[in-house]
Image: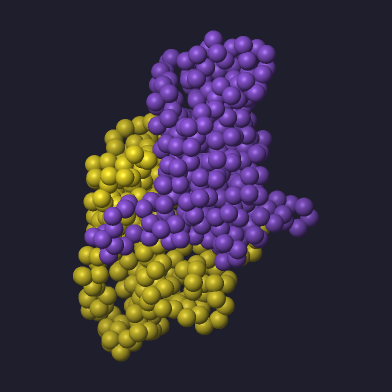
Chain colours: A purple, B yellow
Amino acid sequence: MDAAAGQQQEPQLSLAAVRDALVREEDSVVFALIERARHPRNASAYTPAAGGGRSLVEFFVREAEALQSKASLLLPSAGRYQKPEDVPFFPQDLPSHLFPAKSYPKVLHPVASLVSVNDAIWKMYFNELLPLFTVDGDDGNYAETAALDFACLQVISRRIHIGKYVAEVKFRDAPQDYSPAIQAKDKDTLMNLLTFKAVEEKVKRRVEKKARTFGQNVTLEDSANKQENVAEDSGCKVDPKVLSKLYDQWVMPLTKDVEVEYLLRRLD
Amino acid sequence: MDAAAGQQQEPQLSLAAVRDALVREEDSVVFALIERARHPRNASAYTPAAGGGRSLVEFFVREAEALQSKASLLLPSAGRYQKPEDVPFFPQDLPSHLFPAKSYPKVLHPVASLVSVNDAIWKMYFNELLPLFTVDGDDGNYAETAALDFACLQVISRRIHIGKYVAEVKFRDAPQDYSPAIQAKDKDTLMNLLTFKAVEEKVKRRVEKKARTFGQNVTLEDSANKQENVAEDSGCKVDPKVLSKLYDQWVMPLTKDVEVEYLLRRLD
């Protein structure tokens, strides 16, 4: 998170700042899905190459991640994957001296660098989410499709791994509540402590509304008559219900998995 | 353009389809600028490396373009830069057998592959546009900044080079109007034939409205009271006036440059 990572020593970490980051990330998630939805499924991009090789998408994501970390060869602080919320999908392919980062933000426990749910995100994205917001079909734009998938994966992963900060801020706020469960390795109690149903319902409704707002077809003509700031769902570029489902079924549960995994080792 | 490129032989090309593509591309331009505006200027990404080397951004764009065309090594039809509107910024760095494309859409005159205004787009983006929609400052996220700049450059370039289709469709519609000016190499007359002030004003107002709609901060609270579907400009993630200026000063003039350049060789 930039607010925390930008400071040099003992940065402040507030729940308000973390929440602002999560809310802003929602917009980016919606934009990324809308852009991917310009193309149909394009299943060929996901078919393993002949002889059991990698699919085009896997090839692309591996290479794109390597490129983004190579950037630090030119500008020492420029590399990606140096912030705890930027987690690569293929860390084994990255130049080893670049990962984990040297300039680790001091705001989190060092265990943060080991927490990743990217395998689950990868499976969820391709097996569950993609069929929900792309139409069947093939337009031949596989390289573009792979780049757009990479953008979706990256932003969803970043959103979920901001959970590391959520966990830290909640722990600092009430160490007496969390410490016994951490010491007892009691995942269920931790999960309960981290779950706020009312907040989750609000998040779901908000991302749905964002999809409706950002996915509408804006024309000059409708501005005078319309009384609402959202379009009909049928005219949206991505079904708003897909966004609330994405958050309900996967983003928020996986975020809590990140939080629990981080907290379980918070006292190490 | 997908509608045209997807077909195999003698595809139809309609002004309506080209206009739809241009209108949809506006949304992508707005999204890309909003995402880049999450970060401050980050001037270090644009500073040439010591000894007159390339800047981080130039390094990144060259490598990212090469990666996108390399995709076709895995999947023959997957490479970028095979469609006339996808024009690389550094064509000399791409594997030569991949560019120009083999499966060229037959809808345009072959000269289309030679028409590029990317040098002008590059200068415009970094010298003129970037300071208008990013704040002064440095948050250290240079690799991410470079990736977001690449996304902006790519979508603006694609939007502008769709002008090749605009030119073709207008020529087919009235070859008797265009041919004398083409034969006389009369750029001014061609530019006049291609200029429709009323349409350009509409486009400017529409992109401004899109920036206002997509750049607003969506909250659950404001939905009941709000009578308009757009936010105040001051709360927008990118100033909507920047979008209308971008289109007025650069996107539409450069599109017409593409159209003129294409038409001048349309009868070769």
Which residue sits at x=43%, y=42%?
A: A206
Which residue sits at x=38%, y=56%?
A: A231
Outermost residue toward the right in this view: A51
Image quadrant holding the N terminus of chain A, namely top left
Which residue sits at x=40%, y=32%?
A: A20
Above or below B57: residue A193: above
Outermost residue toward the bottom in this view: B176
Q: Position of residue B130 (x, y in %)?
A: 31, 45
From this viewpoint, is residue A22 visible? yes
From this viewpoint, is residue B157 visible? no
Dividing the picture into quarters, in which one does residue B56 lie? top left
Image quadrant holding the C terminus of chain A, namely top right
Above or below A218: residue A94: above
Please state which of residues A228 and B144 is positioned toward the viewer in this rendering. A228
Dividing the picture into quarters, in which one does residue A219 lie? bottom left
Which residue sits at x=51%, y=57%?
A: A37
Please state which of residues B227 and B13 is positioned toward the viewer in this rendering. B227
Question: How many labels, in total?
Answer: 0
Q: Position of residue B149 (x, y in %)?
A: 40, 46
- Horizontal relation, residue B42 to residue A119: left or right: left
Q: Position of residue A147 (x, y in %)?
A: 54, 52
Q: Position of residue B75 (x, y in %)?
A: 65, 61
- Horizontal relation, residue B263 to residue B141: left or right: left
